[in-house]
Amino acid sequence: MKQYKENSYQSIQVQRLIVFSMYSIIKNSEECTFERLVKECFTLFPRKFGFYRYPEWPDSLRLDRQLRTLRTKGWIIGGAETIFSLTRFGEKIAKDTGKILLGKKVPPRVSKKNLLRDEKLN
């Protein structure tokens, strides 16, 4: 499992990092449970998801509110009691975040409305 350098993810929103971590778990054919997600976020991005006073330990509260917001935005479905999965829009955000982490340019923002429209056309 890859740990990204702090300067590659420090300016990326926590919500995007969470969605990218979900994508990473799902891409490896694993179930994205809350515990697994905490581990993935901390492993990939330790400075963003560790305790301030004890940076060697993951802080699960960093995900709590963010996960509710991600559900409201329509990026994810599921919950801590079940498993999480990405919506099509969430998967697009995760892939774009991966490009940002690799230092590649990301195309202009795609709105959820346009993505849903394109899905209906196909």
Image (cartoon, rainbow, N blue to C red):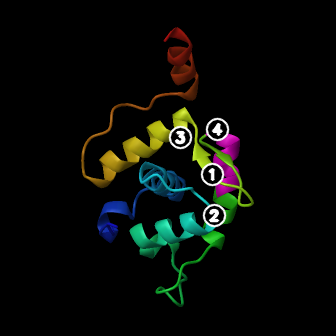
> In the figure, 75 relative to 101: above or below?
above
Residue under label 3, please give it: 90
Verify CB contact (< 8 Å) between mark 2 and mark 1. yes
Q: Amino acid at mark 3?
A: Gly
Q: Is residue 41 magenta?
A: no
Q: Which residues are magenta?
A: 67-74
Q: Secondary structure at mark 2?
A: helix
- C-alpha separation, residue under disc 2 versus residue under disc 1: 8 Å
Residue at the extreme front of the image, as rendered: 29
Q: Nearer the viewer, residue 66 or 32?
A: 32
Specify the amino acid type for callout 1.
Phe
Q: Is residue 72 magenta?
A: yes
Badge 1: residue crowd in 10 Å (few <14, some 14–19, many ≥20): many
Position of residue 82 measured from the top left corner of the image (x, y, whole percent): 71, 56
Q: Earlier in the sequence, mark 3 or mark 4?
A: 4
Please provide percent x and percent y for residue 27: 42, 49
Q: CA distance from mark 3 to mark 1?
A: 11 Å
Q: Position of residue 57 (x, y in %)?
A: 52, 85
96 shown above or below 102: above
Residue 74, numbered label = 4
Q: Residue placed at 57% from the left, 21% from the top?
A: 116
For numbered disc 4, what is the local secondary structure?
loop
Q: CA distance from mark 4 to mark 1?
A: 12 Å
Q: Which amino acid, mark 2?
A: Phe
Query: In the image shown, does 64 or 53 lie closer to the viewer?
Result: 64
Residue in the image at 56% along x and 56% along y? 31
The residue positioned 63% from the left and 48% from the top of the image is 70
Q: Is residue 20 visible?
A: yes
Secondary structure of residue under mark 1: strand
User: Which residue, given by chain and number where applicable, does mark 2 sit on?
Assistant: 34
Identified by mark 4, the residue type is Gly
Q: Quadrant of the N terminus?
A: bottom left
